Image (cartoon, rainbow, N blue to C red):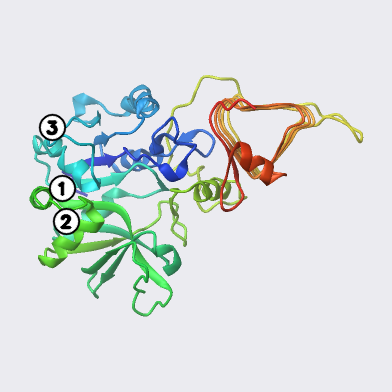
Amino acid sequence: MAKLDVVAMLLAGGEGKRLGPLTRDRAKPAVPFGGIYRLIDFTLSNCINSGIMRVNVLTQYKSESLDRHLINYWNTFFVREFGHYLCIIPPQFRVGNSWYAGTADAIAQNVYTFMRENPEHVLILSGDHVYKMDYALLIHEHVATGANLTIACLEVDVKRATELGVLAIDDEHHVVGFEEKPRNPTSIPGKPGRALASMGIYVFHTDTLVKRLREDARRANSTHDFGREIIPAMLRAHDPVSVHIFRDGNKSETPYWRDVGTLDSFYEANMDLCSVEPVFNLYDSEWPVYTHHIQVPPAKFVFAQKGRNARRGMALDSIVGPGCIISGGRVERCILGPTVRVNSFAQVEDSILMDGVNIGRHARVRRAIIDKGVHLPPGERIGYDLERDARRFVVTPSKIVVIAKETII
């Protein structure tokens, strides 16, 4: 395949209000996921694996931990001498005097970052989705169709489509209609109950992108969003817009893509990883997911006593991060981040424990998300009395108990 003349613009400024309290102290793309990763790692790994080596990351809210992660780890992948770079760009008020008003406004305020290189195409990505995708296939298909914009899409149930942008296409995969978060999503012809949804991944011909952004910036009543403004305007102007059907990097029959925008969806996506054969495979050597690994000892499981009241350190159907010590406690169907400790006779089930969480002796935890640095006292109960939990913590609609970072209990 020919070399890709493309610059990626990665939107990583999401406030992530629906993920609170996990986003109380960090941007949404910096939220830990799967034990050792952060959400942005999946998009950046896709870039590396796809050969996309010119990446601008647009940050905004509470970006300190995200900046550290990008600078201390991800910058090592990009070699300036080869024309590669990962550039972190905070809001600079170069255009106007406001924070980013929408996805299109974020790109519009930073047009200069890619115009000085004059790439043929611009790839627009989000930093808070979980999936594997070869962006090179998307870009080459975009070039082959001659479209000014290509939108990456996947089939979803119509009930799920109410939270996404929904497309209508013709027989040649040209987009003929687009609705952002419709109440009654349009089904795919011949597939009742299924809709074609946007993944929020776009490839633009650069000249077209700049033209449409400038037009949108002049509209005073615009929300400055790609789904609500830019794409509908292009369709009204009969700009050629094509669609790329998502082909999963897992090579599975069911493409895996998750927008973990709520606490419940975040919890479910993590729990998916505990399956014996998860659809989203972290162990695929052909499509590795990269992240920063802290320098700590290996995980350890201690005490193998016998008898009715014996201490046994064990983890079943779980992901256990480095530096964890399961010291006479029992862990089932859990995601444990680095340096978690589960002490004697404690039991943790169906839960996510982030870095440095300490579960006291005889404590019980079920269906919970516990953020970094929380120390659970001996004998504490989480997930057993939801009324009591709701007075102290956040309890989601699916009855998941969420404890904020470094909460004192």
Residue identifier under label 1: 121
Amino acid tagged 3? Arg
**Of tags 2 and 3, which is closer to the observer?**
3
The label number, if any, that marks residue 94 in the structure image: 3
Dot in front, 1 or 3: 3
Q: Nearer the viewer, residue 250 or 151?
A: 151
Q: Is residue 249 left or right of residue 352?
A: left
Residue underneath mark 2 = 143
- Mark 1 / mark 3, whichever is N-terminal: 3
Residue at 58%, 31% in the rendered image: 321
Q: Position of residue 208 (x, y in %)?
A: 10, 53
Q: Is residue 265 visible?
A: yes
* Real-space CA distance between mark 1 and mark 3, rounded to the nearest whole angstrom: 23 Å
Name the quadrant of the C terminus.
top right
Q: Amino acid under label 1?
A: His
CB-based contact (under 8 Å), mark 1 and mark 2 = yes
